[in-house]
DNA sequence: CCAAAAGTGTTTATAATACACCCATGC
DNA sequence: GCATGGGTGTATTATAAACACTTTTGG
Protein backbone atom coordinates (compact mmCIF):
# COMPACT_ATOMS: atom_id res chain seq x y z
CA UNK A 1 0.00 0.00 0.00
CA UNK A 2 2.76 2.40 0.94
CA UNK A 3 6.22 2.41 2.46
CA UNK A 4 5.47 5.01 5.13
CA UNK A 5 4.06 3.00 7.99
CA UNK A 6 3.45 4.18 11.53
CA UNK A 7 3.39 2.54 14.91
CA UNK A 8 0.18 3.66 16.65
CA UNK A 9 -0.14 4.20 20.38
CA UNK A 10 -2.75 5.56 22.76
CA UNK A 11 -1.84 7.89 25.62
CA UNK A 12 -4.20 8.84 28.43
CA UNK A 13 -4.79 12.10 30.24
CA UNK A 14 -6.52 10.72 33.32
CA UNK A 15 -7.81 13.58 35.44
CA UNK A 16 -9.28 13.70 38.91
CA UNK A 17 -9.91 16.37 41.53
CA UNK A 18 -7.97 16.06 44.79
CA UNK A 19 -8.30 18.72 47.43
CA UNK A 20 -8.91 21.87 45.44
CA UNK A 21 -6.94 21.16 42.29
CA UNK A 22 -7.02 19.11 39.11
CA UNK A 23 -4.59 16.19 39.25
CA UNK A 24 -3.28 13.98 36.46
CA UNK A 25 -2.09 10.37 36.64
CA UNK A 26 1.55 10.04 35.55
CA UNK A 27 3.91 7.08 35.37
CA UNK A 28 7.68 6.98 35.83
CA UNK A 29 9.19 5.38 32.74
CA UNK A 30 11.28 2.29 33.40
CA UNK A 31 12.66 1.79 29.90
CA UNK A 32 14.24 3.97 27.21
CA UNK A 33 13.54 6.31 25.60
CA UNK A 34 13.07 8.94 28.32
CA UNK A 35 13.89 6.34 30.99
CA UNK A 36 13.25 7.79 34.44
CA UNK A 37 11.09 10.61 33.12
CA UNK A 38 7.43 11.15 33.94
CA UNK A 39 4.96 10.35 31.18
CA UNK A 40 1.29 9.88 30.49
CA UNK A 41 0.21 6.25 30.76
CA UNK A 42 -0.24 4.60 27.39
CA UNK A 43 0.83 1.84 25.07
CA UNK A 44 0.69 0.48 21.57
CA UNK A 45 -2.57 -0.48 19.89
CA UNK A 46 -2.83 -4.23 19.37
CA UNK A 47 -3.24 -5.76 15.88
CA UNK A 48 -7.01 -6.27 15.99
CA UNK A 49 -7.86 -3.55 18.47
CA UNK A 50 -9.83 -0.34 17.96
CA UNK A 51 -8.58 2.89 19.54
CA UNK A 52 -11.23 3.17 22.24
CA UNK A 53 -10.59 -0.45 23.24
CA UNK A 54 -6.87 0.17 23.58
CA UNK A 55 -7.57 3.26 25.69
CA UNK A 56 -10.09 1.38 27.82
CA UNK A 57 -7.56 -1.40 28.43
CA UNK A 58 -4.89 1.09 29.47
CA UNK A 59 -7.29 2.93 31.76
CA UNK A 60 -8.21 -0.30 33.51
CA UNK A 61 -4.54 -1.27 33.81
CA UNK A 62 -3.48 2.04 35.31
CA UNK A 63 -6.35 2.72 37.65
CA UNK A 64 -7.07 -0.88 38.55
CA UNK A 65 -10.74 -0.18 38.09
CA UNK A 66 -13.20 -1.16 35.44
CA UNK A 67 -14.30 1.66 33.17
CA UNK A 68 -17.85 1.28 34.44
CA UNK A 69 -19.27 4.75 34.64
CA UNK A 70 -15.97 6.49 33.99
CA UNK A 71 -15.84 9.04 31.22
CA UNK A 72 -13.37 8.30 28.42
CA UNK A 73 -13.19 10.16 25.13
CA UNK A 74 -10.75 10.65 22.31
CA UNK A 75 -8.78 13.88 22.55
CA UNK A 76 -6.55 14.33 19.48
CA UNK A 77 -3.79 12.64 17.51
CA UNK A 78 -0.15 13.62 17.48
CA UNK A 79 2.27 12.58 14.76
CA UNK A 80 5.09 15.09 14.58
CA UNK A 81 7.88 13.28 12.67
CA UNK A 82 10.34 13.94 15.49
CA UNK A 83 8.17 13.17 18.48
CA UNK A 84 9.60 9.69 19.17
CA UNK A 85 13.32 8.90 18.74
CA UNK A 86 12.49 5.28 17.89
CA UNK A 87 10.82 6.24 14.61
CA UNK A 88 7.46 7.21 13.24
CA UNK A 89 4.92 6.85 16.03
CA UNK A 90 1.44 8.36 15.95
CA UNK A 91 -0.29 8.59 19.30
CA UNK A 92 -3.98 9.10 19.86
CA UNK A 93 -4.46 11.06 23.07
CA UNK A 94 -7.50 10.22 25.20
CA UNK A 95 -9.11 12.05 28.08
CA UNK A 96 -10.58 10.32 31.14
CA UNK A 97 -12.41 11.72 34.15
CA UNK A 98 -12.36 9.57 37.29
CA UNK A 99 -13.31 10.14 40.92
CA UNK A 100 -10.54 10.27 43.47
CA UNK A 101 -9.63 6.62 43.96
CA UNK A 102 -6.81 4.60 45.48
CA UNK A 103 -4.22 3.55 42.90
CA UNK A 104 -3.05 -0.04 42.63
CA UNK A 105 0.52 -0.20 43.90
CA UNK A 106 1.90 -1.08 40.51
CA UNK A 107 2.12 -4.64 39.53
CA UNK A 108 1.61 -2.92 36.19
CA UNK A 109 4.23 -2.50 33.51
CA UNK A 110 5.01 0.98 34.77
CA UNK A 111 7.49 1.41 37.56
CA UNK A 112 5.24 3.72 39.57
CA UNK A 113 2.14 5.77 39.06
CA UNK A 114 0.82 8.65 41.12
CA UNK A 115 -1.32 11.78 40.99
CA UNK A 116 0.37 15.09 40.19
CA UNK A 117 -1.15 18.59 40.15
CA UNK A 118 -2.03 19.17 36.53
CA UNK A 119 -0.84 22.78 36.67
CA UNK A 120 2.68 21.84 37.77
CA UNK A 121 4.05 18.62 36.31
CA UNK A 122 7.51 19.75 35.20
CA UNK A 123 8.99 18.09 32.14
CA UNK A 124 7.34 15.05 30.64
CA UNK A 125 8.54 12.47 28.13
CA UNK A 126 7.86 12.83 24.39
CA UNK A 127 5.33 15.60 23.62
CA UNK A 128 3.23 14.67 26.64
CA UNK A 129 3.27 18.19 28.06
CA UNK A 130 1.44 19.33 24.97
CA UNK A 131 -1.05 16.46 25.16
CA UNK A 132 -1.67 17.18 28.83
CA UNK A 133 -2.21 20.87 28.11
CA UNK A 134 -4.72 20.00 25.39
CA UNK A 135 -6.48 17.60 27.75
CA UNK A 136 -6.76 20.15 30.55
CA UNK A 137 -8.04 22.78 28.14
CA UNK A 138 -10.64 20.39 26.76
CA UNK A 139 -11.67 19.35 30.26
CA UNK A 140 -12.25 22.94 31.34
CA UNK A 141 -14.22 23.66 28.19
CA UNK A 142 -16.42 20.61 28.58
CA UNK A 143 -17.17 21.37 32.21
CA UNK A 144 -18.67 24.65 31.07
CA UNK A 145 -21.32 23.27 28.79
CA UNK A 146 -21.78 19.61 29.75
CA UNK A 147 -22.72 17.72 32.89
CA UNK A 148 -19.38 15.90 32.94
CA UNK A 149 -18.32 17.41 36.26
CA UNK A 150 -20.34 14.62 37.85
CA UNK A 151 -17.91 12.13 36.27
CA UNK A 152 -15.31 13.32 38.77
CA UNK A 153 -17.59 12.33 41.63
CA UNK A 154 -18.25 8.90 43.12
CA UNK A 155 -21.51 7.18 42.13
CA UNK A 156 -23.41 9.00 44.88
CA UNK A 157 -22.41 12.52 45.79
CA UNK A 158 -23.61 15.75 47.38
CA UNK A 159 -24.15 19.10 45.74
CA UNK A 160 -21.19 20.45 47.74
CA UNK A 161 -18.91 17.76 46.28
CA UNK A 162 -20.03 18.68 42.80
CA UNK A 163 -19.44 22.34 43.51
CA UNK A 164 -15.92 21.49 44.61
CA UNK A 165 -15.25 20.03 41.16
CA UNK A 166 -16.16 23.27 39.43
CA UNK A 167 -14.26 25.38 41.94
CA UNK A 168 -11.15 23.24 41.49
CA UNK A 169 -11.37 23.16 37.72
CA UNK A 170 -11.37 26.91 37.24
CA UNK A 171 -10.21 28.23 40.58
CA UNK A 172 -13.24 30.41 41.35
CA UNK A 173 -15.33 30.14 44.49
CA UNK A 174 -19.01 29.75 43.67
CA UNK A 175 -21.99 30.82 45.74
CA UNK A 176 -23.22 27.60 47.35
CA UNK A 177 -26.83 28.78 47.40
CA UNK A 178 -27.10 29.82 43.78
CA UNK A 179 -25.10 26.78 42.71
CA UNK A 180 -27.50 24.52 44.54
CA UNK A 181 -30.50 25.93 42.74
CA UNK A 182 -28.77 25.93 39.39
CA UNK A 183 -27.87 22.24 39.38
CA UNK A 184 -31.02 20.97 41.05
CA UNK A 185 -33.25 22.93 38.69
CA UNK A 186 -31.50 21.71 35.54
CA UNK A 187 -33.63 18.81 34.26
CA UNK A 188 -31.74 15.55 34.02
CA UNK A 189 -28.54 16.77 35.63
CA UNK A 190 -29.03 15.19 39.05
CA UNK A 191 -31.20 12.30 40.18
CA UNK A 192 -32.02 12.56 43.89
CA UNK A 193 -31.68 9.49 46.08
CA UNK A 194 -33.54 8.94 49.31
CA UNK A 195 -30.29 8.78 51.24
CA UNK A 196 -28.44 11.59 52.95
CA UNK A 197 -24.86 11.78 54.15
CA UNK A 198 -24.37 11.68 57.91
CA UNK A 199 -21.44 12.55 60.11
CA UNK A 200 -20.78 16.01 58.68
CA UNK A 201 -20.75 19.14 60.77
CA UNK A 202 -23.95 20.78 59.61
CA UNK A 203 -27.26 19.70 58.24
CA UNK A 204 -26.97 16.38 56.38
CA UNK A 205 -26.77 16.76 52.61
CA UNK A 206 -28.90 14.84 50.19
CA UNK A 207 -27.14 12.34 47.94
CA UNK A 208 -27.56 12.41 44.17
CA UNK A 209 -26.61 10.27 41.19
CA UNK A 210 -25.74 11.39 37.68
CA UNK A 211 -28.79 12.12 35.57
CA UNK A 212 -29.32 11.38 31.87
CA UNK A 213 -28.62 14.90 30.61
CA UNK A 214 -25.28 15.55 28.95
CA UNK A 215 -25.44 19.12 27.67
CA UNK A 216 -26.02 22.25 29.74
CA UNK A 217 -28.07 25.13 28.35
CA UNK A 218 -27.05 27.68 29.41
CA UNK A 219 -23.44 26.86 30.32
CA UNK A 220 -22.28 26.70 33.91
CA UNK A 221 -19.81 29.57 33.72
CA UNK A 222 -20.50 32.86 32.05
CA UNK A 223 -18.04 35.31 30.56
CA UNK A 224 -15.44 37.16 32.59
CA UNK A 225 -17.58 38.43 35.51
CA UNK B 1 9.47 -1.68 17.77
CA UNK B 2 6.39 -3.76 17.01
CA UNK B 3 4.87 -5.82 14.27
CA UNK B 4 1.51 -4.02 14.19
CA UNK B 5 2.07 -1.14 11.84
CA UNK B 6 -0.55 1.14 10.32
CA UNK B 7 -0.85 3.16 7.16
CA UNK B 8 -1.97 6.67 8.18
CA UNK B 9 -4.22 8.86 6.07
CA UNK B 10 -5.97 12.19 6.47
CA UNK B 11 -9.56 12.72 5.33
CA UNK B 12 -11.25 16.09 5.07
CA UNK B 13 -14.76 17.22 5.88
CA UNK B 14 -14.79 20.45 3.89
CA UNK B 15 -17.97 22.38 4.63
CA UNK B 16 -19.50 25.44 3.05
CA UNK B 17 -22.92 27.10 3.01
CA UNK B 18 -24.73 27.22 -0.31
CA UNK B 19 -28.19 28.63 -0.51
CA UNK B 20 -29.70 27.81 2.84
CA UNK B 21 -27.96 24.53 3.64
CA UNK B 22 -24.62 23.11 4.71
CA UNK B 23 -22.77 21.42 1.86
CA UNK B 24 -19.80 19.07 1.90
CA UNK B 25 -17.14 18.53 -0.75
CA UNK B 26 -17.09 14.91 -1.98
CA UNK B 27 -15.04 13.13 -4.62
CA UNK B 28 -15.99 10.22 -6.86
CA UNK B 29 -13.41 7.47 -6.33
CA UNK B 30 -11.61 6.37 -9.49
CA UNK B 31 -9.71 3.42 -8.05
CA UNK B 32 -10.53 0.44 -5.83
CA UNK B 33 -11.55 -0.05 -3.11
CA UNK B 34 -15.02 1.52 -3.34
CA UNK B 35 -14.35 2.48 -6.96
CA UNK B 36 -17.16 4.71 -8.22
CA UNK B 37 -18.41 5.55 -4.73
CA UNK B 38 -18.47 9.02 -3.21
CA UNK B 39 -15.88 9.70 -0.53
CA UNK B 40 -14.35 12.46 1.52
CA UNK B 41 -11.21 13.87 -0.09
CA UNK B 42 -8.05 12.63 1.54
CA UNK B 43 -4.79 10.79 1.13
CA UNK B 44 -1.86 9.18 2.87
CA UNK B 45 0.49 11.10 5.11
CA UNK B 46 3.96 11.43 3.61
CA UNK B 47 7.07 10.07 5.38
CA UNK B 48 8.29 13.36 6.90
CA UNK B 49 4.94 15.12 7.07
CA UNK B 50 2.92 16.18 10.10
CA UNK B 51 -0.86 15.65 10.15
CA UNK B 52 -1.86 19.28 9.73
CA UNK B 53 0.54 19.64 6.80
CA UNK B 54 -0.96 16.63 5.06
CA UNK B 55 -4.45 18.02 5.61
CA UNK B 56 -3.42 21.46 4.39
CA UNK B 57 -1.93 19.93 1.25
CA UNK B 58 -5.12 17.99 0.54
CA UNK B 59 -7.30 21.04 1.15
CA UNK B 60 -5.27 23.06 -1.33
CA UNK B 61 -5.41 20.21 -3.86
CA UNK B 62 -9.16 19.80 -3.65
CA UNK B 63 -10.28 23.40 -3.46
CA UNK B 64 -7.53 24.83 -5.65
CA UNK B 65 -7.10 27.60 -3.15
CA UNK B 66 -4.38 28.36 -0.66
CA UNK B 67 -5.39 27.81 2.94
CA UNK B 68 -4.96 31.52 3.62
CA UNK B 69 -7.68 32.47 6.04
CA UNK B 70 -9.51 29.18 5.81
CA UNK B 71 -10.28 27.36 8.99
CA UNK B 72 -8.81 23.86 9.30
CA UNK B 73 -8.74 21.78 12.46
CA UNK B 74 -8.29 18.19 13.47
CA UNK B 75 -11.53 16.33 14.07
CA UNK B 76 -10.86 12.78 15.29
CA UNK B 77 -9.07 9.58 14.36
CA UNK B 78 -10.68 6.40 13.12
CA UNK B 79 -8.97 3.03 13.20
CA UNK B 80 -11.59 0.29 13.28
CA UNK B 81 -9.72 -2.88 12.22
CA UNK B 82 -12.22 -3.51 9.43
CA UNK B 83 -12.58 0.00 8.05
CA UNK B 84 -10.31 -0.51 5.01
CA UNK B 85 -10.24 -3.79 3.03
CA UNK B 86 -6.61 -3.17 2.09
CA UNK B 87 -5.41 -3.61 5.65
CA UNK B 88 -4.81 -1.62 8.78
CA UNK B 89 -5.35 2.04 7.94
CA UNK B 90 -5.83 4.77 10.54
CA UNK B 91 -7.31 7.98 9.23
CA UNK B 92 -7.23 11.34 10.96
CA UNK B 93 -10.38 13.25 10.06
CA UNK B 94 -10.06 17.01 9.66
CA UNK B 95 -12.70 19.72 9.47
CA UNK B 96 -12.46 22.74 7.16
CA UNK B 97 -14.76 25.76 6.75
CA UNK B 98 -14.53 27.57 3.43
CA UNK B 99 -16.64 30.23 1.70
CA UNK B 100 -18.64 29.24 -1.33
CA UNK B 101 -16.02 29.09 -4.05
CA UNK B 102 -15.71 27.73 -7.58
CA UNK B 103 -14.09 24.30 -7.64
CA UNK B 104 -11.19 23.53 -9.95
CA UNK B 105 -12.49 21.25 -12.66
CA UNK B 106 -10.36 18.36 -11.53
CA UNK B 107 -6.89 18.10 -12.81
CA UNK B 108 -6.57 16.56 -9.38
CA UNK B 109 -6.13 12.88 -8.60
CA UNK B 110 -9.85 12.52 -8.01
CA UNK B 111 -12.14 11.88 -10.95
CA UNK B 112 -14.60 14.60 -9.95
CA UNK B 113 -15.42 16.72 -6.97
CA UNK B 114 -18.57 18.63 -6.17
CA UNK B 115 -20.67 20.04 -3.35
CA UNK B 116 -23.41 17.86 -1.85
CA UNK B 117 -25.99 18.77 0.81
CA UNK B 118 -24.45 17.54 4.05
CA UNK B 119 -27.79 16.26 5.29
CA UNK B 120 -28.34 13.96 2.32
CA UNK B 121 -25.21 12.36 0.90
CA UNK B 122 -26.33 8.76 0.52
CA UNK B 123 -23.74 6.04 0.99
CA UNK B 124 -20.08 6.94 1.19
CA UNK B 125 -16.92 4.86 0.93
CA UNK B 126 -15.21 3.41 4.01
CA UNK B 127 -16.57 4.88 7.27
CA UNK B 128 -16.86 8.32 5.76
CA UNK B 129 -20.54 8.69 6.68
CA UNK B 130 -19.53 8.48 10.30
CA UNK B 131 -16.68 10.96 9.84
CA UNK B 132 -19.00 13.36 8.03
CA UNK B 133 -21.61 13.08 10.77
CA UNK B 134 -18.97 13.82 13.40
CA UNK B 135 -17.78 16.80 11.37
CA UNK B 136 -21.24 18.27 10.98
CA UNK B 137 -21.94 17.80 14.66
CA UNK B 138 -18.68 19.50 15.60
CA UNK B 139 -19.34 22.32 13.15
CA UNK B 140 -22.76 23.04 14.64
CA UNK B 141 -21.34 22.96 18.16
CA UNK B 142 -18.50 25.32 17.32
CA UNK B 143 -20.79 27.81 15.63
CA UNK B 144 -22.61 28.17 18.92
CA UNK B 145 -19.72 29.32 21.02
CA UNK B 146 -17.05 30.56 18.60
CA UNK B 147 -16.85 33.19 15.88
CA UNK B 148 -16.09 30.56 13.23
CA UNK B 149 -19.26 31.29 11.26
CA UNK B 150 -17.29 34.09 9.64
CA UNK B 151 -14.96 31.44 8.19
CA UNK B 152 -17.79 30.46 5.86
CA UNK B 153 -17.91 33.98 4.47
CA UNK B 154 -15.64 35.62 1.91
CA UNK B 155 -12.97 38.01 3.22
CA UNK B 156 -15.45 40.90 3.24
CA UNK B 157 -19.07 40.23 4.04
CA UNK B 158 -22.28 41.78 5.32
CA UNK B 159 -24.13 41.07 8.54
CA UNK B 160 -26.92 39.50 6.50
CA UNK B 161 -24.48 37.05 4.91
CA UNK B 162 -23.23 36.08 8.32
CA UNK B 163 -26.76 35.63 9.57
CA UNK B 164 -27.42 33.34 6.63
CA UNK B 165 -24.61 31.06 7.86
CA UNK B 166 -26.23 30.64 11.24
CA UNK B 167 -29.69 30.16 9.77
CA UNK B 168 -28.39 27.50 7.39
CA UNK B 169 -26.36 25.69 10.04
CA UNK B 170 -29.26 25.11 12.38
CA UNK B 171 -32.31 25.79 10.31
CA UNK B 172 -33.83 28.55 12.44
CA UNK B 173 -34.69 32.01 11.18
CA UNK B 174 -33.12 34.71 13.32
CA UNK B 175 -34.36 38.23 13.94
CA UNK B 176 -32.22 40.41 11.64
CA UNK B 177 -32.37 43.38 13.97
CA UNK B 178 -31.33 41.62 17.16
CA UNK B 179 -28.75 39.60 15.27
CA UNK B 180 -27.22 42.80 13.94
CA UNK B 181 -26.78 44.23 17.40
CA UNK B 182 -25.52 41.00 18.85
CA UNK B 183 -22.65 40.56 16.41
CA UNK B 184 -21.71 44.22 16.08
CA UNK B 185 -21.64 44.68 19.84
CA UNK B 186 -19.46 41.64 20.50
CA UNK B 187 -15.92 43.01 20.84
CA UNK B 188 -13.51 41.58 18.29
CA UNK B 189 -16.07 39.62 16.30
CA UNK B 190 -16.37 41.99 13.33
CA UNK B 191 -14.03 44.70 12.03
CA UNK B 192 -15.94 47.34 10.03
CA UNK B 193 -14.57 48.44 6.69
CA UNK B 194 -15.29 51.78 5.04
CA UNK B 195 -16.90 50.06 2.09
CA UNK B 196 -20.53 49.15 1.55
CA UNK B 197 -22.13 46.75 -0.87
CA UNK B 198 -24.08 48.29 -3.74
CA UNK B 199 -26.59 46.86 -6.17
CA UNK B 200 -28.92 45.29 -3.63
CA UNK B 201 -32.56 46.18 -3.36
CA UNK B 202 -32.60 48.07 -0.09
CA UNK B 203 -30.21 50.26 1.82
CA UNK B 204 -26.59 49.30 1.11
CA UNK B 205 -25.06 47.11 3.80
CA UNK B 206 -21.75 47.79 5.44
CA UNK B 207 -18.92 45.35 4.77
CA UNK B 208 -16.98 43.72 7.59
CA UNK B 209 -13.91 41.53 8.01
CA UNK B 210 -13.27 38.85 10.60
CA UNK B 211 -12.11 40.24 13.91
CA UNK B 212 -9.52 38.79 16.30
CA UNK B 213 -11.99 37.22 18.75
CA UNK B 214 -12.46 33.46 18.64
CA UNK B 215 -14.75 32.60 21.55
CA UNK B 216 -18.28 33.87 22.15
CA UNK B 217 -19.53 34.57 25.67
CA UNK B 218 -22.40 34.06 25.81
CA UNK B 219 -23.01 31.59 22.96
CA UNK B 220 -24.91 32.53 19.84
CA UNK B 221 -27.79 30.12 20.33
CA UNK B 222 -29.56 29.52 23.58
CA UNK B 223 -31.43 26.43 24.70
CA UNK B 224 -34.63 25.17 23.09
CA UNK B 225 -36.70 28.40 23.04
C1' DC C 1 -27.72 26.87 72.96
C1' DC C 2 -24.25 27.60 69.47
C1' DA C 3 -21.68 26.66 65.27
C1' DA C 4 -21.78 24.96 60.82
C1' DA C 5 -23.35 23.46 56.60
C1' DA C 6 -27.77 22.54 53.72
C1' DG C 7 -31.27 24.44 51.42
C1' DT C 8 -35.18 28.30 50.22
C1' DG C 9 -37.19 32.92 49.28
C1' DT C 10 -36.79 37.45 47.68
C1' DT C 11 -34.73 41.50 45.85
C1' DT C 12 -31.96 43.63 42.35
C1' DA C 13 -29.13 44.04 38.32
C1' DT C 14 -28.35 42.52 33.75
C1' DA C 15 -29.18 40.75 29.45
C1' DA C 16 -32.25 38.87 25.81
C1' DT C 17 -36.37 39.27 23.14
C1' DA C 18 -40.04 41.67 20.57
C1' DC C 19 -41.11 45.19 17.85
C1' DA C 20 -41.84 50.22 16.52
C1' DC C 21 -39.35 53.12 13.93
C1' DC C 22 -35.95 55.62 10.86
C1' DC C 23 -32.41 55.25 6.83
C1' DA C 24 -30.76 54.68 2.15
C1' DT C 25 -31.10 52.76 -1.96
C1' DG C 26 -33.52 50.74 -6.82
C1' DC C 27 -37.29 51.18 -9.67
C1' DG D 1 -43.46 57.52 -4.14
C1' DC D 2 -43.05 53.08 -2.58
C1' DA D 3 -41.05 48.63 -1.82
C1' DT D 4 -37.03 46.53 0.23
C1' DG D 5 -33.62 45.41 3.12
C1' DG D 6 -30.16 47.89 6.56
C1' DG D 7 -29.76 49.65 10.95
C1' DT D 8 -31.29 51.96 15.82
C1' DG D 9 -34.13 52.87 19.98
C1' DT D 10 -36.96 51.16 23.56
C1' DA D 11 -40.31 48.52 26.37
C1' DT D 12 -40.99 44.02 28.17
C1' DT D 13 -39.58 39.83 29.89
C1' DA D 14 -36.55 36.29 31.49
C1' DT D 15 -32.53 35.16 33.95
C1' DA D 16 -28.64 35.41 37.02
C1' DA D 17 -26.28 37.34 40.92
C1' DA D 18 -26.59 38.95 45.87
C1' DC D 19 -27.95 37.95 50.20
C1' DA D 20 -31.38 37.49 54.21
C1' DC D 21 -33.32 33.69 56.17
C1' DT D 22 -34.91 28.96 57.69
C1' DT D 23 -33.59 23.95 58.44
C1' DT D 24 -31.06 20.21 60.53
C1' DT D 25 -27.47 18.24 62.30
C1' DG D 26 -23.01 17.76 66.02
C1' DG D 27 -21.16 19.17 70.18
Image (tube, coloured by chain):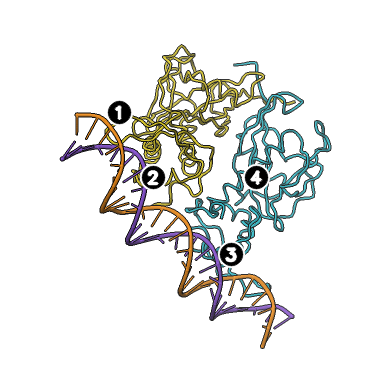
Chain colours: A yellow, B cyan, C purple, D orange
Tell me the distance, in whole angstroms, between the alpha carbons under discs 2 and 4.
33 Å
Q: Of marks 2 and 1, which one's residue comes earlier in the chain?
A: 2
Tag 2 near tag 3, CB within 8 Å: no
> To which residue does mark 1 refer?
A199
Quadrant of the rendering where the N terminus of chain A is positioned: top right
Element at label 1: loop
Residue A179 - label: 2
Chain bearing tag 3 is B
Q: Residue at x 61, y 56 (%)?
A: B166
* Circle 2 Cα neighbour tier, 10 Å, few/some/many (<14 / 14–19 / ≥20): some
Tag 3 near tag 1, CB within 8 Å: no
Q: Could you tell me residue B168's position as x and y percent?
A: 66, 55
Element at label 3: loop
Tell me the distance, in whole angstroms, between the alpha carbons under discs 2 and 1.
23 Å
Element at label 4: helix
Task: Kindly report which numbered mark, 2 or 4, lies closer to the viewer in this rendering.
Answer: 2
Element at label 2: helix
Q: Could you tell me residue A155's position as x and y percent?
A: 46, 29
* Circle 3 Cα neighbour tier, 10 Å, few/some/many (<14 / 14–19 / ≥20): few
Q: Residue at x 76, y 39 (%)?
A: B39
Lateral position of residue B122 relative to residue B59, left or right: right
Residue B136 - label: 4
Whether callout 2 and callout 4 share a subunit is answered: no
Q: Of marks 3 and 4, which one's residue comes earlier in the chain?
A: 4
Q: Residue at x 41, y 28 (%)?
A: A123
* Placement of B176 over or under A172, stated as above or below: below
Task: Kindly report which numbered mark, 3 or 1, lies closer to the viewer in this rendering.
Answer: 1
Would you identify the image quadrant in which residue A114 lies? top left
Amino acid sequence: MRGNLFAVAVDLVILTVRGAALHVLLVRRGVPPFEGALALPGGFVLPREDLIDAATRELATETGVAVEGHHLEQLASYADPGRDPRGRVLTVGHLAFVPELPLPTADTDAAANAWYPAADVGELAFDHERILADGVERARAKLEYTTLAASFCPPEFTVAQLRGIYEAAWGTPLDPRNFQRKVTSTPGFLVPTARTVSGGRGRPAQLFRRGPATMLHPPMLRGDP
